[in-house]
Image: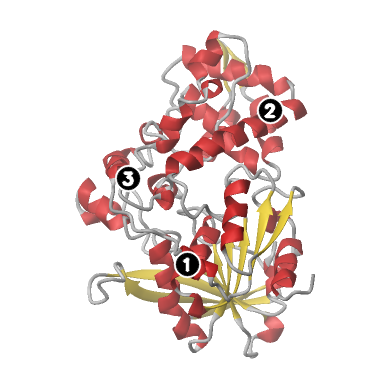
Amino acid sequence: MTSYTQPGVVLTDHRFTVPLDHGDPSGERIELFAREVVAGAKTGENLPWLVYLEGGPGFGARRFTGRQAWLGRALQEFRVLLLDQRGTGLSTPANRQTLPLRGGPREQADYLAHFRADSIVRDCEAIRPRLTGDAPWTVLGQSFGGFCATHYLSAAPEGLRTVLITGGLPSLDATADEVYRAAYPRIARKVEAHYARYPQDIGRARRIAEHLAEHSPVVLPTGYTLTPEAFQSLGTVLGRGDGSHQLHYLLENAFVRAPGGQVLSDAFQEGAAAALSYAAHPLYALLHEAIYAQGGEPTDWAAERTRGEFARFDATTTLAGDGPLYFTGESVHPWTFESDPALRPLRETAHLLAAGTDWRPLYDTDRLAANEVPVAAAVYHDDMYVDTEHSLRTARAIRGLRTWVTDEYEHDGVRTSGPRVLDRLLALTRNEI
């Protein structure tokens, strides 16, 4: 272990090995990385543990500096573990560079089938006794981390002291098709709210999409192929607290006059490439629909298929008329693996995962109905990424769960609210409010 300091905190890096397949504990093992954080004045105290599960799938734990965001509140009473979920960050990374070590697309897909919430929870249970002396710990799950926490309640509640969920109460039974069918109307509302705030962006977005259609293919300096459909994907930021403003600033800087006429500015191309690239989190693209799979049906590119039911999101139809271009949200499509150079080598693997039919159920409704672990969840009203009604239906199915439904924050409320969201959730689990 390596320990070091930042302002007000002491950090310790931990590395663990766990089975790739927890059903085969004597088989192949992978490495997990986790960073322990404790307040500098409390390093010698016997504090309870809080493990943070990041959103995603496919994102490593947030790299904080000091006591940023919710961390300062947590450090008042907890020793915090920031876990890089398997395949992310420093935990045996899975990406275009490393996955060929597994073999071809079939072997890669079989390997990645072990990277869903069920395996992440078993990882947590494998490392918990090594840190806590087998005492239960508190889990804070953001977004997909909340999906993992819900599975934790189903699979290993004995390891849990308290569960805190922010923007991540999943449907217990919705198919991927149902998830995206519910998502597109929410996305449309976010786009309409953006255009109401920044009406000048209606013309700007159409002009950019028209340029991309007329000059196809437009290849950014990073190698990313920017099509009208890929440009629409920039709408994923509209579910964040400052996302509408960031999208506006990107669009306003789209064109410059060059000797040959109007061209996309380098600044816009750089910003678009950074926003759209999956280079730092390829598992997000590879497993995004698989996090909803629970049974014998393939996900089969659900976001792409259900998008066809909502004509307003069709860029070709929009550009043939005079209506506003609708951005899309948190969705992955077959063409995503053609546009992004970080994903192109993995496109066959992605198709195999989309065709998979042997996904195990993730939630035990009987066990959740008998839950005894204190649980609180922040449900962000009209959350673009997680359907509010799905979340509230799940909340009613988990015994004792208390909700805080708010429209004060977007999906990233736990990160943008300072201590407030975490403080409110802790108070709910302790019946202080």
* Residue type for callout 2: Glu
State the residue in front, 358 or 276: 358
Q: How far from the left and from the top, in percent, is residue 162? A: 61, 75
Q: Residue at x 55, y 32 (%)?
A: 328
Q: Earlier in the sequence, mark 1 or mark 2?
A: 2
Residue at the image point whose x is 60% and y is 15% from the top = 207
Give the foreground label among 1 and 2: 1
Q: Are marks 2 and 3 in contact (CB under 8 Å)?
A: no
Nearest to viewer (mark 2 / mark 3): 3
Residue located beneath label 2 in the image: 192
In the rendered structure, which amino acid carries the disc numbered 1?
A: Asp
Which residue has dot 3 on it? 297
Would you place residue 4 above or below residue 65 in this image? below
**Callout 1 crowding tier (Cα within 10 Å): few <14, some 14–19, many ≥20:** few
Residue at image point 42% right, 65% down: 120
Drawn side of residue 84 relative to residue 93, left or right: right
Q: Earlier in the sequence, mark 3 or mark 1?
A: 3
* Rendered position, 129 above or below 398: below
CB under 8 Å between discs 3 and 1: no
Q: In the image, what residue type sits under mark 3?
A: Glu
Q: Secondary structure at mark 1?
A: helix
Q: Position of residue 231 (x, y in %)?
A: 52, 27
Q: CA distance from mark 2 to mark 3?
A: 34 Å
